[in-house]
Image (cartoon, rainbow, N blue to C red):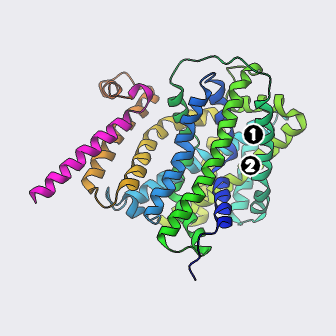
Amino acid sequence: MKQKKLDTKQIIISGLALFAIFFGAGNLIFPPFLGLNSGKDWFLASLGFNLSDSLLILLGILALSFRSANLKSFAGKLSNSFGSILSLVCITLVGPLLSIPRTGATTYEVALSPFYPNINKILFSFLFFALVYILTINGSKVVDRVGKYLTPTLLIILAILIIKGIFYPDVVLESTAGNKFSAGFIEGYQTMDSLGPIFLTGIILEDLKNKGISEKNDLIRATIYSGLIAVFGLVIVYTGLTYVGAKSIAFADPDLNRTSLLIAISENLLGRNVQIALSLVVGFACLSTAIGLVSAFASIFAENFKKLSYRFFVRLGVVISFVLSILGVDKIMEISIPILLFVYPIVISLYILNLIDRGNISPLAYKISIGAVALVSFADALSALGFSNNFYVNGINKLPMADAGFAFVFVFLISLIFGLLISKNQKGIE
């Protein structure tokens, strides 16, 4: 295939497609809740949220692009199998363990229960995931075709909601306790978007190659430009929703959970008819997301465990998702927090190492820095589980930046420098 020059129109199309991949309907419940609980400091909270969601998506895609989406190259300095294991962990988290169950629970809580509160949750979840199973197994193109209209429709409704929220009568916003930047950063973990590049970058690069872009430098540039477009879109939507959430204090109960708050905002700002439209679009978008994630989960696991079929892993993913979805959005998130507090710092550190590594960072430095970060993130996970009153966790909590939840950043920098110095000394001795 003849090498093509970077085409502005193709880059824009790729950027919008990338935006659609990461802009999940389930993510709508996070920014408004963050805004409501941040009050006057909503922008600081939104900044933290966008850094751990939008910016990390871009950094992740770039880090994997530099390695041509080769997981062995990406994490090979830790071990030959670490990249594959990390990919399986991430698709399990983004798949049947957390995100897929949340699509079913969100559909029930946002799209159905406000209008039909007496419908049994277990029955609905069963029907939802039965449909997911049928459409995934049969490879139906119906959802793909409908999906082309879902994201634009959802964005139009959200634009109306955000504009109405901006022009809503002025509300006196008050400061609330706590580090809002840190709260926003941790809330951004819940979207799990930033774990996506580990198993999605290969698909993105393949799409660009199919468009005639084959040179590595051109691929990286195209990825950067497409990523910037996607990130810009995500930042606008999430920042707008956070601001609307902050102003919702005028009519919303501060004790509302995430899904109830989104419903209250749509009721007050959109009116009944548009609220129904939003609920339907969110429901179909969640269905589409569930199908895509089940398929990705089954494909990746079938590729790694060849003795078991794609259909087996589809069934496994659907069954796990169905069982967990019954718990509801809040309970799923409660389960997810300690897991994400452990995994995210490791993934973030790996992204940064790959972005700065030009062949000058030794395997030893990788192992020391990632190992040190894992020790810190494990302490944060234990604390989230309620095991905070012990020598180990108390010791980690005394580290610089621990109060804000960023002890892992300090430890990463110090351990990387330490690892580089040891590597340099070893080379000198040799």
Q: Which residue is mark 1?
A: 108
Would residue 366 be found to the left or right of residue 138 on screen? Answer: left
Specify the amino acid type for callout 1: Tyr
Question: At 68% from the left edge and 62% from the top edge, which residue is drawn?
Answer: 13
- Please provide the residue range marked out in magenta: 402-430
Compared to residue 260, the image places residue 95 above or below, namely below
Q: Is residue 313 visible in this depiction of the protein? A: no
Sequence-first disc among 1 and 2: 1
Magenta-span inclusion, residue 426: yes
Specify the amino acid type for callout 2: Phe
Q: Secondary structure at mark 2?
A: helix
Q: Quadrant of the C terminus?
A: bottom left
Q: In the image, residue 380 lies at what x, y percent?
A: 41, 32
Would residue 296 be found to the left or right of residue 260 on screen? Answer: left
Compared to residue 36, the image places residue 225 above or below, namely below
Q: Are marks 1 and 2 in contact (CB under 8 Å)?
A: yes
Q: Is residue 86 visible in this depiction of the protein? A: yes
Q: Which residue is mark 2?
A: 128
Q: In the image, residue 424 lies at what x, y percent?
A: 18, 53
